[in-house]
Amino acid sequence: MNEIQFLPKKDQEDIESKANRKLEELHLHSRILGQHVFNIVKREATLLQSPFSDKEFCAFVCQKKGRLFVYINSQIPEEKQHFAAAHELYHIWFDQEYLYNPEMLNSGTLEDKTENMRELRANLFAAMLLVPKHVLEKELLFLNISKKSVTPYQVVELSNTFQVPYKTMVRRLYEIEFIDKNLMKQLWEEKDIPLIRKKLQLEQHILNPIIRYEGLVENALFLYEHGQ
């Protein structure tokens, strides 16, 4: 757990306020976002999705000639794509300077294996946007999950429901004080997540990675119709 960084309480509260405010503005405060996060990205930038063989490379956002572009590696698991998209939304909405000096978002950064405060804030925002506290608490009540005795199976089911990475759900359960630090550590270090997914029939296969270049077909038809 030494490589996992936690932001100060004041920063956590500030970022949670930002995430809740955005959900309110988008009229999405009481729902699970999941894949819908891509639609939010498309409201803010040109979304590009295509497979890239290096699965450590997840995403990036940049500004070019006054336009914003978000690229997501569609070769990585869907839940990581959702998290990466939400991460980049933080930079778009609250970190304008980043857009002029962007960095490639890699898998290690997504798992908080970084001391970069900017990236840690973006990760926390992504987690709170995709797994709002009040929505998670309702789901825990609905599933009748006991506080402080959560199992890896239950975390896998929750992460599947919210369409986020397993470790994101572990952290959210700890952040809302549903589990203590010892249980968080046990869940975080669980080695059999792939096997648990198989047992629950929740395996994820990326057989046909998405290739999406926003506006490509429309623009190509426009040029064709105009003899270009």
Image (cartoon, rainbow, N blue to C red):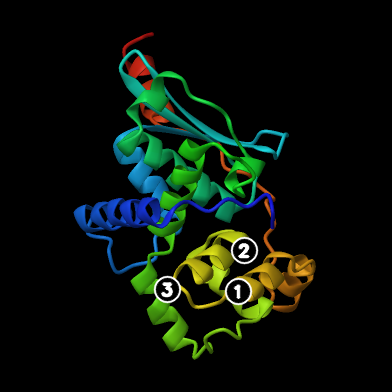
Residues under numbered marks 2 and 1 in contact, where contact means CB atoms less than 8 Å apart: yes
Is 46 situated above or below 181?
Answer: above
Q: Classify the position of the N terminus by image quarter.
A: bottom right
Is 53 situated above or below 172?
Answer: above
Where does the image place residue 78, in percent across and percent down from the top left? 58, 53
Left or right: residue 34 versus residue 16 is right
Give the distance between the C-alpha atoms of the residues marked 3 and 2, in whole angstroms. Answer: 14 Å
Residue in the image at 39% along x and 35% along y: 91
Where does the image place residue 92, in percent across and percent down from the top left? 35, 34
Give the distance between the C-alpha atoms of the residues marked 2 and 1, in whole angstroms. Answer: 7 Å
Mark closest to the chain's N terminus, 2 or 1: 1
Identity, as a three-letter code, of the amino acid under mark 1: Val
Query: In this rendering, does residue 75 appear at all?
Result: no
Residues under numbered marks 1 and 3 in contact, where contact means CB atoms less than 8 Å apart: no
User: Any mark on residue 136, and which?
Assistant: 3
Q: Nearer the viewer, residue 111 or 208?
A: 111
Mark closest to the chain's N terminus, 1 or 3: 3
Q: Nearer the viewer, residue 184 or 84?
A: 184
Residue in the image at 57% along x and 42% along y: 210
User: Any mark on residue 220, and which?
Assistant: none
Residue tagged 2: 166
Is 21 situated above or below 226?
Answer: below
Q: Nearer the viewer, residue 210 or 28?
A: 28
Q: Classify the position of the C terminus by image quarter.
A: top left
Query: In this rendering, does residue 51 appear at all?
Result: yes
- Residue 131 in which image quadrant: bottom left
Residue in the image at 60% along x and 74% along y: 155
Circle 2 packing at 10 Å, graded few (<14), some (14-19), many (20+), is: many
Residue tagged 1: 155
Where does the image place residue 193, in percent across and percent down from the top left? 74, 68
Helix, strand or loop under label 1: helix
Give the distance between the C-alpha atoms of the residues marked 1 and 3, in whole angstroms. Answer: 12 Å
